Image (cartoon, rainbow, N blue to C red):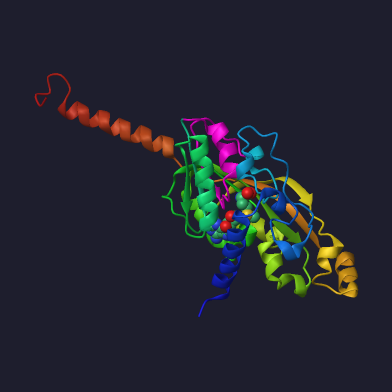
Amino acid sequence: MKTQEENLKEIVKEKYGEIALQSAEYNASTCCGAGPSAGSYTIMSESYEHLKGYNPDADLSLGCGLPTQFANIQAGDTVIDLGSGAGNDCFIARAETGATGKVIGIDFTKAMIEKARKNAEKLGYNNVEFREGDIENMPVNDNIADVIVSNCVLNLVPNKRNVIQEIFRVLKPSGHFSISDIVLEGDLPEALKTAAEMYAGCVSGAIQKLEYLQLIKEAGFTNITVQKEKPIFLPDNILMEYLSIDALKEFLASGTGIYSVTVYAEKPAVEGTKKEKIRINLADVANSTSCCTPGSGCC
Ligand SMILES: C[S@@+](CC[C@H](N)C(=O)[O-])C[C@H]1O[C@@H](n2cnc3c(N)ncnc32)[C@H](O)[C@@H]1O
């Protein structure tokens, strides 16, 4: 029997598999692409058109921020995008890394990976790669990324601690991340919490903002900063698909907030890395005098 976490992942995969085959215009009329029964949701995604590297074929209007805006990507960087969808943020990142860098998108929905690969092929990029895999167990080696970005994905992952620990593993020491996501302040009504559409729609899988930041701190990150925060208002007609009038009134009066946030944090540098190097060099010099200095008789 599947665990609850596995079931949630199945729901997400199925939903985003359908979305990958729909048009961007259709998705734009839904919340985080939540699909037909969600109707015309408030759009969480922000406009990408003005960004360098923007590729309309990769923009399915599924994001909830602009993570690359605060990612400080440099030419030559290795960037990983978690839950890359059709590659929207990967192509923005590629505009910043240039041809000397490398961009890896990871997504567990096959149809998204296929769409993203087609987009990269059309652009003729050989340094933008899409890997199929679960970001709770990333298909990448330790310490390879300078920067990690992600847009509206961690809320969909049942075990957020696992993902954050994986981010720490794959970032180089001194590397950093910039992640846009949905968080909560206060509780959602039970009927929203348990609705599959609300989970796939990036609402009910969201955790409390303080808990989110605490997980990042516990993983060992420093300089944790909320770069941007924006309230998300779900329209009443959508909420009424799940709540009675009285329950809706109670929810609106409860003060619970749903927010789009963009969080930045750094993996610390390895303590003493530079000193270590100098020590090794000095040791080499010491050895060389015992063996290879002119007149030492061994070279
Ligand atoms: C809301 S969409 C965002 C897509 C993309 N970041 C964008 O802004 O266009 C979420 C994406 O995350 C992927 N996803 C969700 N959970 C995942 C997981 N555990 N591992 C890998 N990908 C995941 C979905 O397949 C989907 O493509």
Q: Quadrant of the C terminus?
A: top left
* Residue furthest out toward the top: 294
Which quadrant of the picture is home to ligand 1?
A: bottom right
Which is more toward the observer, 274 or 117?
Answer: 117
The magenta segment: 71-99
Residue 16 at what x, y percent from top left? 60, 59
Q: Residue at x 54, y 49 (%)?
A: 115
Residue 110 at what x, y percent from top left? 51, 57
| Image: 168 above or below 288 | below
* Residue furthest out toward the left: 297
Please give left or right for residue 202 compared with residue 3 in the image.
Answer: right
Residue 68 at what x, y percent from top left? 63, 40
Q: Quadrant of residue 292?
A: top left
Q: Residue at x 65, y 59 (%)?
A: 155
Please give left or right for residue 179 compared with residue 170 in the image.
Answer: right
- Is 265 colored magenta in this rendering? no
Q: Is residue 270 visible?
A: no
| Image: 78 above or below 42 | above
Total labels drawn: 0
Q: Quadrant of residue 32?
A: bottom right
Please give left or right for residue 33 compared with residue 218 in the image.
Answer: right
Q: Residue at x 76, y 52 (%)?
A: 43
- Is 76 colored magenta in this rendering? yes
Q: Is residue 97 visible?
A: yes
Residue 72 at what x, y percent from top left? 60, 35
